[in-house]
Image (spheres, rainbow, N blue to C red):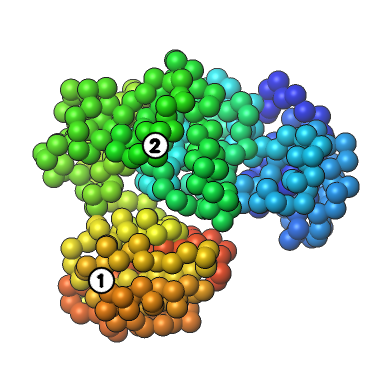
Amino acid sequence: MKILHDFPYQHVLVLGLAKSGTAAAHLLLDSGVRIRINDFASDADAPEVKALTDKGAEAILGAHPLSALDDIDLIVKNPGISYENILLVEAAQRKIPVVTEVELAHYVAPDNEMLAITGSNGKTTTTTLVYEMLQKSKQPVRLAGNIGIVASEVARQAKDEEKLVLELSSFQLMGIQKFKPHIAALLNLFEAHLDYHGSMDAYVNAKKEIFKNQTERDFLIFNAENKNVLEAVQEARASLVPFSVNKQQPHGAWADEQAVYFKDQHIIDKKEILLPGDHNLENVLAAVCIACLSGASIAGIQQVLKTFTGVEQRLQFVRELHDRVYYNDSKATNILATEKALQSFDQPTILLAGGLDRGNSFDELLASMKNVKAMVLFGETKEKLKQTANKANIPVAIADTLTDATKTAHEMSSPGDVILLSPACASWDQYKTFEERGNMFVQAVHTLQ
């Protein structure tokens, strides 16, 4: 497996283990870099910790003492750790640089072509579409990033000719210095993760990191319909490639009432695209831009669009039972994502929603709730969501757990209904990840009789 090339640091603190931190730590050790690991939740007997200490890592566990920074010249942090963490605040004072493991992918595979995708919504769908389009076009490609696959670990395994398709979050992008994708995509920008970033400006600035190192030889795919995106890309040096669902784009991807095009090339008739929802048309257009610029064939693109039904946890079809259809949209961790999900269905819908309370109300959902016949609410935000439902005169049931919510929704439903889990909230009040939450829903659906 590959190791780091021309890596300028000698003693690195890996802050937070989990999947990405553990992979980064092994990469650093295998590359001959001295490391210290610091994780609040792990203990010395944990298998992942023991594997690292057996290879020579120093471990400080159960606390974040400032001594963890002694003689450190770089921090590789878990993306989810806040910059308000005491060690990161002190690191800023000491001018110790802080990166996420995505930055390490640059040092592992500097010659591999990187295709990176970010945005407030649609990242996973677009990233998966691009990966499958290139696969079907017989292009050598690997998938990684925020999609749940550690980027630096995949970079270690990649052959030089393989492209890396990466989904990147704002948390990951805040920690890059030299990482540079040849093709970047900025899908959309809406208010999200403001509890982490503190302001919309800070959030947008984090997203703009995806193109900060690009040059005129690189490409930036952008949403020509999104005002925040249009403002952001004014700073880009890369060649700009727009996509639009409403206006012809001679230099990018676009759609009319009948078909999807890239520049003047007909790609596919819209009626042949299997992926549901108008919002997914934007994801399709972005994916078409990236795939075409990366050498995908029209036949390969068409094959994917005619068969792709979505990704797990994002409008994932689960089951049809007694003429009811169940969809898992657990990845909808903000209001906009739930709005898009609701707009995907014309049928009467029972919405399961709730989760971590980030301090916001949910009245922005009202405009998208015309087909919602009932709501089953759970988690910290259930009472706030109930207030929104009351304004729309939508019946509400309250459940303690998602399993109970699923049973209740089934009992409230009628033939022809959609039962949709689309929480509009992060999962961390009751579940470790949105995947765990979605899998709980899928399991509960399959127990229904």
Left or right of 335 on screen, residue 280: left
Left or right of 35 on screen, residue 235: left
Q: Residue 357, percent across and down?
A: 52, 68
Residue 448 position (above or below residue 28): below
Q: Nearer the viewer, residue 349 or 234?
A: 234
Q: Quadrant of the N terminus?
A: top right
Amino acid type at mark 2: Val
Q: Residue 120, percent across and down?
A: 43, 47
Q: Residue reaching furthest top?
A: 217
Question: Can residue 195 be seen here?
Answer: yes
Estimate how packed mark 1 is, as few (under 14), some (14 to 19) or many (20 or more) residues with alpha carbons within 10 Å: many
Nearer the N terminus, badge 2 or badge 1? Answer: 2
Residue 389 position (above or below residue 35): below
The disc placed on residue 229 is 2
Q: Quadrant of residue 321?
A: bottom left
Say if mark 2 contacts mark 1, CB within 8 Å: no
Q: Which residue is mark 1?
A: 372
